[in-house]
Amino acid sequence: MLGEVRLPTLGVNIDHIATIRQARRTVEPDPVAAAVLAELGGADGITVHLREDRRHIQQRDVQLLRQTVRTHLNLEMAATDEMVAIALDIKPDYVTLVPEKREEVTTEGGLDIVGQLERMNEVVDKLQSADIPVSLFIDADRAQIEASVKTKAQFIELHTGRYAEAHNEANRQQELTVLSQGAEQAIASGLRVNAGHGLTYWNVYAVACISGMEELNIGHTIVSRAALVGLERAVREMKQAIRGEL
Ligand code: PXP
């Protein structure tokens, strides 16, 4: 008998709801309301990135979301002392550590765990000792996965940006193979595997089919569609896309 295929869950990243609010430094739209609608649409988790420059999500948002999110809250953050203190205070359901540069439009590339193993060990240990599981956002690179295992983080999130930006089918297949092999290596080493960045309604299904993939964190494409059709429907349609039904 064929085993049941388990498709990954969907973490909806609502940063760009806050981007619209911050464009006018006003109070609408509220990410707290967006999280409710995303959950009504079938989101399995809510993801927010509290950046050092606070360009979209604010500390107030994370504090309120901690109280209102009914699924789980994934806090993306840089591995700085300021952010670790905030995470220890708010206690999200898990933290995803990401690299952060002030001048970037969005996260570019994965974390260099190999090059800062000592710091990563320290941050992962602080968070996981407080019962906050940690996920490391990395490229599907053999050495980075091996270093991630050493940190004892429970999860990695594979950076799907290069796959999303592939300019032809051969390149897309090549990047998909890199992601599948990365997931296989990580799972064999005891890590749990999520993925995200640049995923869309059109490219998500192949990543959803990677064996052992647990959660996909998706933001920009959902908020873009939500501007036209509403957030609840946009999330429902992304769940369909993950199942290959769109
Ligand atoms: N995962 C991580 C670690 C990210 O930094 C981002 C962007 O904030 C995402 C997923 C979502 O990417 P996108 O908005 O392109 O779906």
Image (spheres, rainbow, N blue to C red):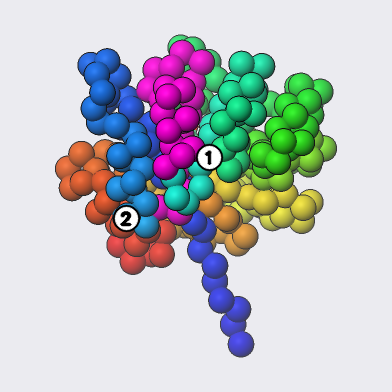
In-image side of 245 versus 176 (left or right): left
Cα–Cα span, label 2 and label 1: 18 Å
Picture residue at 27% right of the left edge, 51% below the top: 232
- Crowd around label 1: few <14 · some 14–19 · many ≥20 (10 Å): many
Picture residue at 70% right of the left edge, 41% below the top: 131
Tell me the residue that label 2 is attached to: 41
Picture residue at 53% right of the left edge, 34% below the top: 75
Residue 109: percent from the left, percent from the top? Answer: 56, 28
Residue 44: percent from the left, percent from the top? Answer: 45, 54
| The C terminus: image quadrant | bottom left
Callout 2: SS = loop
Residue 51: percent from the left, percent from the top? Answer: 49, 20
Residue 19: percent from the left, percent from the top? Answer: 32, 25
Asked whether disc 2 touches disc 1, contact meaning CB atoms under 8 Å apart, the reply is: no
> Looking at this view, is 237 or 128 the one in front?
128
Callout 1 amino acid: Asn
Callout 1: SS = strand
Res 223 visible: yes
Residue farthest to the bottom? 1
Give yes or no for residue 44 being in the magenta stretch. yes
Q: Which mark is residue 162?
A: none
> Looking at this view, is 1 or 223 the one in front?
223
Bounds of the magenta segment = 43-68
Picture residue at 43% right of the left edge, 17% below the top: 54
Pick whichever of labels 2 and 1 is earlier in the sequence: 2
**Tally of numbered tags:** 2
Tell me the residue that label 1 is attached to: 74
Q: Is residue 108 above or below residue 241?
A: above
Give yes or no for residue 145 being in the magenta stretch. no
Res 175 visible: no
